[in-house]
Image (spheres, rainbow, N blue to C red):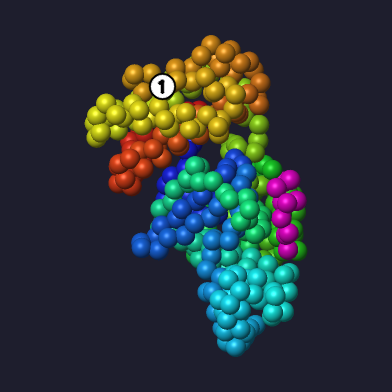
Amino acid sequence: MNNIWSQGSFDKIPFSKLLFHIWDSERSGRLEIKKGTAEKRLDFKKGNIIIEKDSFDVKFLFKTLIEKKILNSSSLKKCENFSAKNKTSLMKASIELGILSPSQLWKFMEDFIKEDFFPLFDCSQAEYFFDQKHLLQEAFILFSISTLNLILQGVRQMQNFDLIKSHIPQGAEPLQILSPDNLNKVNLEPPEEYLFNLIANNKNLKDIYNFSELGKKETQKIVFVFFCLGALGLPQMKTQSQSPQEFSPAEVYKILDAFNNKCSYIFKYISKEIGPVALNVLEKCIEDTKSNVSPFFQNIKLGLDGRIETNSILKTNISVPSKENQRTLLRDLNEILAAEILAVKKTLGNDHESMLVKNLEKIGELN
Protein backbone atom coordinates (compact mmCIF):
# COMPACT_ATOMS: atom_id res chain seq x y z
CA MET A 1 0.00 0.00 0.00
CA ASN A 2 1.17 3.49 -0.76
CA ASN A 3 2.75 5.02 2.33
CA ILE A 4 2.53 8.57 0.97
CA TRP A 5 0.66 9.91 4.01
CA SER A 6 3.67 9.07 6.19
CA GLN A 7 6.66 10.78 4.53
CA GLY A 8 7.32 12.78 1.41
CA SER A 9 7.27 16.16 -0.30
CA PHE A 10 4.73 18.48 -1.86
CA ASP A 11 6.25 18.08 -5.31
CA LYS A 12 4.75 14.58 -5.34
CA ILE A 13 1.50 15.21 -3.50
CA PRO A 14 -0.03 18.65 -2.84
CA PHE A 15 -0.99 19.66 0.70
CA SER A 16 -4.70 19.36 -0.08
CA LYS A 17 -4.45 15.74 -1.22
CA LEU A 18 -2.17 14.85 1.68
CA LEU A 19 -4.81 16.13 4.10
CA PHE A 20 -7.40 13.95 2.36
CA HIS A 21 -5.20 10.84 2.69
CA ILE A 22 -4.85 11.47 6.43
CA TRP A 23 -8.61 12.02 6.82
CA ASP A 24 -9.59 9.06 4.66
CA SER A 25 -7.31 6.64 6.55
CA GLU A 26 -8.43 8.07 9.92
CA ARG A 27 -4.87 8.73 11.06
CA SER A 28 -3.96 10.01 14.51
CA GLY A 29 -0.67 11.78 15.17
CA ARG A 30 1.25 14.90 14.19
CA LEU A 31 1.97 16.16 10.68
CA GLU A 32 5.29 18.03 10.60
CA ILE A 33 5.94 20.28 7.58
CA LYS A 34 9.27 21.89 6.78
CA LYS A 35 9.96 24.48 4.10
CA GLY A 36 13.47 25.83 4.33
CA THR A 37 13.94 26.92 7.94
CA ALA A 38 10.20 27.36 8.53
CA GLU A 39 8.30 24.58 10.26
CA LYS A 40 4.59 24.00 10.86
CA ARG A 41 2.63 21.21 12.48
CA LEU A 42 -0.91 19.92 12.58
CA ASP A 43 -2.29 17.36 15.04
CA PHE A 44 -4.88 14.79 14.03
CA LYS A 45 -7.28 12.46 15.80
CA LYS A 46 -8.89 9.86 13.56
CA GLY A 47 -8.36 12.05 10.53
CA ASN A 48 -9.68 15.34 11.87
CA ILE A 49 -7.53 18.28 12.95
CA ILE A 50 -7.16 18.82 16.69
CA ILE A 51 -6.09 22.12 18.22
CA GLU A 52 -4.34 22.04 21.59
CA LYS A 53 -3.36 24.91 23.87
CA ASP A 54 0.21 24.87 22.63
CA SER A 55 -0.76 24.62 18.94
CA PHE A 56 -0.28 28.34 18.33
CA ASP A 57 1.01 31.59 19.82
CA VAL A 58 -1.96 33.24 21.58
CA LYS A 59 -0.10 36.54 21.94
CA PHE A 60 0.51 36.64 18.19
CA LEU A 61 -3.21 35.96 17.69
CA PHE A 62 -4.05 38.98 19.84
CA LYS A 63 -1.58 41.15 17.93
CA THR A 64 -3.23 40.02 14.69
CA LEU A 65 -6.62 41.04 16.09
CA ILE A 66 -5.14 44.46 16.89
CA GLU A 67 -3.85 44.79 13.30
CA LYS A 68 -7.35 43.97 12.05
CA LYS A 69 -8.73 46.59 14.46
CA ILE A 70 -10.84 43.99 16.25
CA LEU A 71 -8.97 44.75 19.48
CA ASN A 72 -6.85 47.71 20.56
CA SER A 73 -3.43 47.70 22.20
CA SER A 74 -4.84 48.75 25.57
CA SER A 75 -7.02 45.62 25.62
CA LEU A 76 -3.96 43.45 25.09
CA LYS A 77 -2.13 45.29 27.88
CA LYS A 78 -5.06 44.71 30.25
CA CYS A 79 -5.04 41.01 29.40
CA GLU A 80 -1.28 40.76 29.94
CA ASN A 81 -1.51 42.50 33.34
CA PHE A 82 -4.44 40.32 34.42
CA SER A 83 -2.64 37.19 33.19
CA ALA A 84 0.56 38.06 35.11
CA LYS A 85 -1.28 39.03 38.29
CA ASN A 86 -3.55 35.97 38.37
CA LYS A 87 -1.09 33.52 36.78
CA THR A 88 -3.53 32.57 34.07
CA SER A 89 -3.53 32.46 30.27
CA LEU A 90 -4.22 35.39 27.95
CA MET A 91 -7.22 33.46 26.66
CA LYS A 92 -8.80 33.19 30.08
CA ALA A 93 -7.87 36.79 30.89
CA SER A 94 -9.67 38.12 27.79
CA ILE A 95 -12.86 36.30 28.81
CA GLU A 96 -12.63 37.15 32.52
CA LEU A 97 -12.25 40.84 31.63
CA GLY A 98 -15.16 40.70 29.18
CA ILE A 99 -12.96 41.79 26.28
CA LEU A 100 -13.98 38.78 24.22
CA SER A 101 -16.80 36.29 24.63
CA PRO A 102 -15.92 32.57 24.51
CA SER A 103 -17.66 32.13 21.15
CA GLN A 104 -15.79 35.14 19.70
CA LEU A 105 -12.44 33.91 20.94
CA TRP A 106 -12.96 30.36 19.66
CA LYS A 107 -14.04 31.68 16.24
CA PHE A 108 -10.98 33.98 16.06
CA MET A 109 -8.69 31.07 17.01
CA GLU A 110 -10.12 28.81 14.31
CA ASP A 111 -9.89 31.52 11.64
CA PHE A 112 -6.35 32.40 12.75
CA ILE A 113 -5.17 28.80 12.49
CA LYS A 114 -6.80 28.23 9.11
CA GLU A 115 -5.26 31.41 7.68
CA ASP A 116 -1.86 30.28 8.93
CA PHE A 117 -2.11 27.11 6.85
CA PHE A 118 -3.76 28.51 3.72
CA PRO A 119 -0.40 29.40 2.06
CA LEU A 120 0.55 25.70 2.11
CA PHE A 121 -2.17 24.93 -0.42
CA ASP A 122 -0.25 26.94 -3.03
CA CYS A 123 3.10 25.48 -1.96
CA SER A 124 4.80 22.97 -4.26
CA GLN A 125 8.12 22.62 -2.38
CA ALA A 126 8.05 21.38 1.22
CA GLU A 127 8.95 18.22 3.10
CA TYR A 128 6.57 16.49 5.49
CA PHE A 129 6.59 13.68 8.02
CA PHE A 130 3.66 12.15 9.87
CA ASP A 131 4.57 11.18 13.44
CA GLN A 132 2.00 8.59 14.45
CA LYS A 133 3.63 8.22 17.88
CA HIS A 134 2.70 11.74 18.94
CA LEU A 135 0.11 11.54 21.69
CA LEU A 136 -2.58 14.15 22.09
CA GLN A 137 -3.13 15.58 25.55
CA GLU A 138 -6.88 15.25 25.80
CA ALA A 139 -7.14 17.73 28.68
CA PHE A 140 -5.51 20.44 26.55
CA ILE A 141 -7.69 20.06 23.43
CA LEU A 142 -9.48 23.32 22.59
CA PHE A 143 -11.46 22.28 19.52
CA SER A 144 -11.35 20.30 16.29
CA ILE A 145 -11.44 21.42 12.66
CA SER A 146 -13.08 19.42 9.89
CA THR A 147 -10.24 18.31 7.61
CA LEU A 148 -12.54 18.19 4.58
CA ASN A 149 -13.78 21.74 5.19
CA LEU A 150 -10.20 22.98 5.58
CA ILE A 151 -9.37 21.39 2.20
CA LEU A 152 -12.37 23.09 0.61
CA GLN A 153 -11.59 26.51 2.12
CA GLY A 154 -7.88 26.20 1.38
CA VAL A 155 -8.37 25.35 -2.31
CA ARG A 156 -10.91 28.17 -2.72
CA GLN A 157 -8.23 30.77 -1.97
CA MET A 158 -5.49 29.14 -4.11
CA GLN A 159 -3.68 31.26 -6.71
CA ASN A 160 -1.17 28.69 -7.94
CA PHE A 161 -3.05 27.58 -11.07
CA ASP A 162 0.02 25.75 -12.39
CA LEU A 163 -0.20 23.44 -9.38
CA ILE A 164 -3.95 23.00 -9.90
CA LYS A 165 -3.58 22.15 -13.60
CA SER A 166 -0.79 19.67 -12.91
CA HIS A 167 -3.05 17.60 -10.63
CA ILE A 168 -6.19 17.37 -12.74
CA PRO A 169 -6.70 15.55 -16.06
CA GLN A 170 -5.80 17.37 -19.24
CA GLY A 171 -7.83 17.20 -22.45
CA ALA A 172 -11.07 15.31 -22.94
CA GLU A 173 -10.68 12.58 -20.33
CA PRO A 174 -13.91 11.16 -18.94
CA LEU A 175 -14.62 11.72 -15.24
CA GLN A 176 -16.26 9.46 -12.70
CA ILE A 177 -18.06 10.39 -9.49
CA LEU A 178 -16.42 8.25 -6.81
CA SER A 179 -17.58 9.27 -3.33
CA PRO A 180 -20.30 11.94 -3.57
CA ASP A 181 -21.14 11.43 0.13
CA ASN A 182 -17.91 13.27 0.98
CA LEU A 183 -19.49 16.46 -0.36
CA ASN A 184 -22.31 16.10 2.15
CA LYS A 185 -19.70 16.63 4.88
CA VAL A 186 -18.65 20.07 3.61
CA ASN A 187 -20.41 23.38 3.00
CA LEU A 188 -20.47 23.83 -0.76
CA GLU A 189 -21.21 27.22 -2.24
CA PRO A 190 -23.78 27.55 -5.08
CA PRO A 191 -21.13 27.68 -7.89
CA GLU A 192 -19.62 24.45 -6.56
CA GLU A 193 -23.01 22.75 -6.42
CA TYR A 194 -23.69 23.99 -9.94
CA LEU A 195 -20.47 22.51 -11.30
CA PHE A 196 -20.97 19.17 -9.54
CA ASN A 197 -24.40 18.88 -11.16
CA LEU A 198 -22.81 19.77 -14.50
CA ILE A 199 -20.18 17.06 -14.02
CA ALA A 200 -22.85 14.51 -13.10
CA ASN A 201 -24.57 15.14 -16.43
CA ASN A 202 -21.47 15.64 -18.60
CA LYS A 203 -18.78 13.05 -17.93
CA ASN A 204 -16.37 14.47 -20.51
CA LEU A 205 -13.97 17.08 -19.14
CA LYS A 206 -13.80 18.99 -22.42
CA ASP A 207 -17.59 19.34 -22.49
CA ILE A 208 -17.59 20.49 -18.87
CA TYR A 209 -15.16 23.30 -19.74
CA ASN A 210 -17.32 24.29 -22.72
CA PHE A 211 -20.60 24.27 -20.79
CA SER A 212 -19.38 25.80 -17.53
CA GLU A 213 -20.42 29.40 -16.95
CA LEU A 214 -17.60 29.83 -14.43
CA GLY A 215 -14.72 30.23 -16.87
CA LYS A 216 -11.92 27.73 -17.29
CA LYS A 217 -9.73 28.73 -14.32
CA GLU A 218 -12.51 28.65 -11.76
CA THR A 219 -13.88 25.44 -13.27
CA GLN A 220 -10.44 23.83 -12.99
CA LYS A 221 -10.15 24.95 -9.37
CA ILE A 222 -13.48 23.37 -8.43
CA VAL A 223 -12.66 20.18 -10.38
CA PHE A 224 -9.39 20.08 -8.44
CA VAL A 225 -11.13 20.43 -5.07
CA PHE A 226 -13.55 17.61 -5.99
CA PHE A 227 -10.51 15.44 -6.77
CA CYS A 228 -8.91 16.44 -3.45
CA LEU A 229 -12.09 15.55 -1.54
CA GLY A 230 -12.20 12.09 -3.11
CA ALA A 231 -15.54 12.85 -4.76
CA LEU A 232 -14.26 12.80 -8.32
CA GLY A 233 -11.71 10.84 -10.30
CA LEU A 234 -10.92 9.00 -13.48
CA PRO A 235 -12.80 5.77 -14.22
CA GLN A 236 -9.78 3.62 -13.42
CA MET A 237 -9.07 5.40 -10.12
CA LYS A 238 -9.82 3.79 -6.77
CA THR A 239 -9.88 5.70 -3.51
CA GLN A 240 -9.28 4.45 -0.02
CA SER A 241 -12.87 5.31 0.82
CA GLN A 242 -14.02 2.66 -1.65
CA SER A 243 -13.98 -0.94 -0.49
CA PRO A 244 -10.82 -2.72 -1.56
CA GLN A 245 -11.02 -5.81 -3.70
CA GLU A 246 -10.86 -9.13 -1.93
CA PHE A 247 -7.49 -10.88 -1.95
CA SER A 248 -7.03 -14.59 -2.40
CA PRO A 249 -4.92 -16.45 0.21
CA ALA A 250 -2.06 -16.50 -2.32
CA GLU A 251 -2.27 -12.72 -2.74
CA VAL A 252 -2.26 -12.24 1.03
CA TYR A 253 0.97 -14.22 1.35
CA LYS A 254 2.43 -12.17 -1.51
CA ILE A 255 1.57 -8.94 0.34
CA LEU A 256 3.13 -10.25 3.55
CA ASP A 257 6.27 -11.24 1.64
CA ALA A 258 6.57 -7.76 0.08
CA PHE A 259 6.10 -6.25 3.53
CA ASN A 260 8.83 -8.45 5.01
CA ASN A 261 11.23 -7.53 2.20
CA LYS A 262 10.89 -3.93 3.35
CA CYS A 263 11.34 -4.90 7.01
CA SER A 264 14.47 -6.88 6.14
CA TYR A 265 15.91 -3.91 4.27
CA ILE A 266 15.23 -1.57 7.20
CA PHE A 267 17.04 -3.98 9.52
CA LYS A 268 20.05 -4.25 7.19
CA TYR A 269 20.18 -0.47 6.80
CA ILE A 270 20.17 0.34 10.50
CA SER A 271 22.52 -2.59 11.30
CA LYS A 272 25.20 -1.11 9.05
CA GLU A 273 25.12 2.05 11.18
CA ILE A 274 24.77 0.80 14.76
CA GLY A 275 25.62 -2.91 14.62
CA PRO A 276 23.92 -5.69 16.66
CA VAL A 277 21.97 -3.23 18.82
CA ALA A 278 19.79 -2.59 15.75
CA LEU A 279 17.73 -5.67 16.57
CA ASN A 280 16.93 -4.30 20.04
CA VAL A 281 15.89 -0.94 18.56
CA LEU A 282 13.47 -2.55 16.12
CA GLU A 283 12.16 -5.08 18.65
CA LYS A 284 11.21 -2.23 20.98
CA CYS A 285 9.62 -0.44 18.03
CA ILE A 286 7.47 -3.51 17.29
CA GLU A 287 6.36 -3.83 20.91
CA ASP A 288 5.45 -0.14 21.10
CA THR A 289 3.44 -0.41 17.88
CA LYS A 290 1.19 -3.23 19.12
CA SER A 291 -1.05 -0.75 20.92
CA ASN A 292 -1.83 0.89 17.55
CA VAL A 293 -2.64 -2.21 15.49
CA SER A 294 -5.44 -4.75 15.40
CA PRO A 295 -5.57 -8.04 17.38
CA PHE A 296 -4.24 -9.85 14.28
CA PHE A 297 -0.78 -8.45 15.01
CA GLN A 298 -0.58 -8.75 18.80
CA ASN A 299 1.59 -11.89 18.69
CA ILE A 300 4.07 -10.85 16.02
CA LYS A 301 7.79 -11.06 16.70
CA LEU A 302 10.90 -9.84 14.94
CA GLY A 303 13.17 -12.47 13.43
CA LEU A 304 16.95 -12.32 13.44
CA ASP A 305 16.90 -11.05 9.85
CA GLY A 306 14.49 -8.23 10.65
CA ARG A 307 11.50 -9.96 9.08
CA ILE A 308 8.23 -10.23 11.00
CA GLU A 309 7.32 -13.72 12.18
CA THR A 310 3.55 -13.86 11.67
CA ASN A 311 1.71 -16.62 13.48
CA SER A 312 -0.77 -19.03 11.92
CA ILE A 313 -3.76 -17.23 13.47
CA LEU A 314 -2.90 -14.01 11.60
CA LYS A 315 -2.53 -15.84 8.30
CA THR A 316 -5.73 -17.85 8.75
CA ASN A 317 -7.90 -14.90 9.76
CA ILE A 318 -6.56 -12.46 7.18
CA SER A 319 -6.89 -15.06 4.43
CA VAL A 320 -10.63 -15.23 5.02
CA PRO A 321 -12.15 -13.31 2.08
CA SER A 322 -13.40 -10.42 4.18
CA LYS A 323 -12.89 -6.90 2.85
CA GLU A 324 -12.79 -5.53 6.38
CA ASN A 325 -10.11 -8.02 7.44
CA GLN A 326 -7.99 -7.26 4.42
CA ARG A 327 -8.34 -3.49 4.81
CA THR A 328 -7.20 -3.95 8.42
CA LEU A 329 -4.22 -5.98 7.18
CA LEU A 330 -3.04 -3.23 4.83
CA ARG A 331 -3.56 -0.52 7.43
CA ASP A 332 -1.62 -2.43 10.09
CA LEU A 333 1.26 -3.25 7.76
CA ASN A 334 1.65 0.42 6.91
CA GLU A 335 1.44 1.27 10.62
CA ILE A 336 4.34 -1.06 11.39
CA LEU A 337 6.46 0.20 8.49
CA ALA A 338 5.88 3.82 9.49
CA ALA A 339 6.91 2.97 13.07
CA GLU A 340 10.16 1.35 11.91
CA ILE A 341 10.96 4.35 9.70
CA LEU A 342 10.35 6.63 12.69
CA ALA A 343 12.71 4.46 14.76
CA VAL A 344 15.41 5.01 12.13
CA LYS A 345 14.78 8.75 12.23
CA LYS A 346 15.11 8.87 16.02
CA THR A 347 18.21 6.70 16.02
CA LEU A 348 20.14 7.97 12.99
CA GLY A 349 18.63 11.35 12.12
CA ASN A 350 16.67 12.95 9.31
CA ASP A 351 19.20 12.39 6.51
CA HIS A 352 19.25 8.63 7.05
CA GLU A 353 15.47 8.58 7.28
CA SER A 354 15.13 10.34 3.91
CA MET A 355 17.61 7.97 2.28
CA LEU A 356 15.82 4.95 3.74
CA VAL A 357 12.42 6.08 2.45
CA LYS A 358 13.77 6.63 -1.07
CA ASN A 359 15.32 3.17 -1.09
CA LEU A 360 12.15 1.53 0.24
CA GLU A 361 10.18 3.03 -2.64
CA LYS A 362 12.33 1.00 -5.04
CA ILE A 363 11.42 -2.25 -3.31
CA GLY A 364 7.79 -1.91 -4.38
CA GLU A 365 4.29 -1.43 -3.00
CA LEU A 366 2.32 -3.77 -0.77
CA ASN A 367 -0.67 -3.95 -3.13
The percent position of residue 352, horizontal first and vertical second, equals 30, 42
The residues colored magenta run: 180-189
Q: Could you tell me if residue 223 is visible in this image? A: no
Tag 1 residue: 302
Residue 45, relative to residue 79: is it above or below?
above
Left or right: residue 338 versus residue 211 is left
Which residue is at the front of the view, 216 or 241? 241
Residue 299, relative to residue 91: is it above or below?
above
| Residue 54 lies in quadrant | bottom right
Mark 1 secondary-structure assignment: strand
- Identity, as a three-letter code, of the amino acid under mark 1: Leu
The percent position of residue 270, horizontal first and vertical second, equals 30, 33
The percent position of residue 312, horizontal first and vertical second, equals 53, 11
Q: Is residue 258 magenta?
A: no
| Residue 46 lies in quadrant | top right
Q: Residue at x 56, y 26 (%)?
A: 329
The percent position of residue 319, horizontal first and vertical second, equals 59, 15
Q: Residue at x 48, y 46 (%)?
A: 130
Label tally: 1
Q: Is residue 187 magenta?
A: yes
Q: Residue at x 65, y 71 (%)?
A: 92
Residue 153, relative to residue 66: is it above or below?
above
| Residue 153 lies in quadrant | bottom right
Q: Residue at x 66, y 56 (%)?
A: 144
| Mark 1, other Cα within 10 Å: few <14 / some 14–19 / many ≥20 | many
Which residue is at the front of the view, 211 or 294? 294
Which residue is at the front of the view, 341 or 35? 341
Residue 169, relative to residue 257: is it above or below?
below
Left or right: residue 50 versus residue 280 is right
Q: Main secondary structure of the magenta part?
A: helix
